[in-house]
Image (spheres, grey):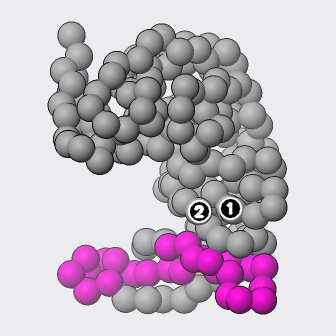
Amino acid sequence: YAFAGGAAASGTTEAPLQIYDVSNPSAPSFVREQVVVSGDAVWGIRPLDARYLALFVESDDGYLRIVDRQNISALAAVAQVPGMYDAGGIVSGNTFYVYGDYSGVTAVDITDRTHPAIVGSVDTRFGASSIALSGTNELAVADGVAGITFIDVTDRTAPHIKGTQQVPGAPADLVVIGKTIYVASELELDALTRP
């Protein structure tokens, strides 16, 4: 199944999550929608594992909502982390590293998916718009006009910036494949090769 977030209808404060059957990728079909959040819009959706989804919700007080999707006919919100104005993230072991514009990178312990807890954070230099695992205990962050910021997460309770690599433009997205970091900005696509 695939999931899509949406904005709340005018005059309401409940944004639905849409569910699609993608067993035939050339002909996905709408299954149903279900409200699992209160807020203006589902800003981002990331799988935590085969059972749980993380929803980033835009509202007066943005938050991260964990949803159990084991029963596709009855999605269940199981946890919420308030005060998070984030847009995405990546899972490494039992840590969900989330990012979002000017809130830097936050480490959330997801050992117990029903009781997530913020365990550390670090401010990035500009607006974080994408994140990837770039090495052992290292994250690469598309960090606006700063370039690519590398964060050491050896101790997830005290992540810290190792350094920044300038690239043309303001990186908006990045992907790591092997030792190569592909960086997309408004100007070009760059490939940085790690030693």
Cβ atoms under marks 1 and 2 closer than 8 Å: yes
**Helix, strand or loop: magenta stretch:** loop
**Relative side of 2 to 70, left or right:** left
Does residue 175 appear in the picture of this structure? no
Seen at 49% across and 72% down, the residue is 3
Q: Amino acid at mark 1?
A: Val
Q: Position of residue 146 (x, y in %)?
A: 43, 27
Quadrant (top left, top right, bottom left, bottom right) of the C terminus: top left
**Residue type marked 2:** Trp
Q: Is residue 11 magenta?
A: yes
Nearer to us in this view, 182 or 55:
182
Name the residue nearer the viewer: 99 or 144. 144
Q: Is the residue marked by circle 2 packed among few (<14), some (14-19), or many (20+) residues within 10 Å?
A: many
Splitting the image into 4 quarters, where does residue 108 fall?
Answer: top right
Residue 84 among those drawn in magenta: no
As rendered, which of 34 and 69 lies closer to the eye?
Answer: 34
Q: Is residue 75 left or right of residue 24?
A: right
Q: Quick check: 32 above or below 42?
A: below
Helix, strand or loop for disc 2: strand
- Dot label at residue 100: none
Image mark for residue 43: 2
Relative to residue 186, is residue 76 depicted above or below? below
What span is in magenta?
4-28
Q: Is residue 156 above or below residue 2?
A: above
- Residue sitting at x 62%, y 77%: 7
State the SS at label 1.
strand
In the picture of the structure, the residue carrying the numbered disc 1 is 57
> Disc 1 versus disc 2: distance between alpha carbons?
5 Å
Q: Quarter of the image holding residue 24?
A: bottom left
Q: Residue at x 68, y 62 (%)?
A: 57
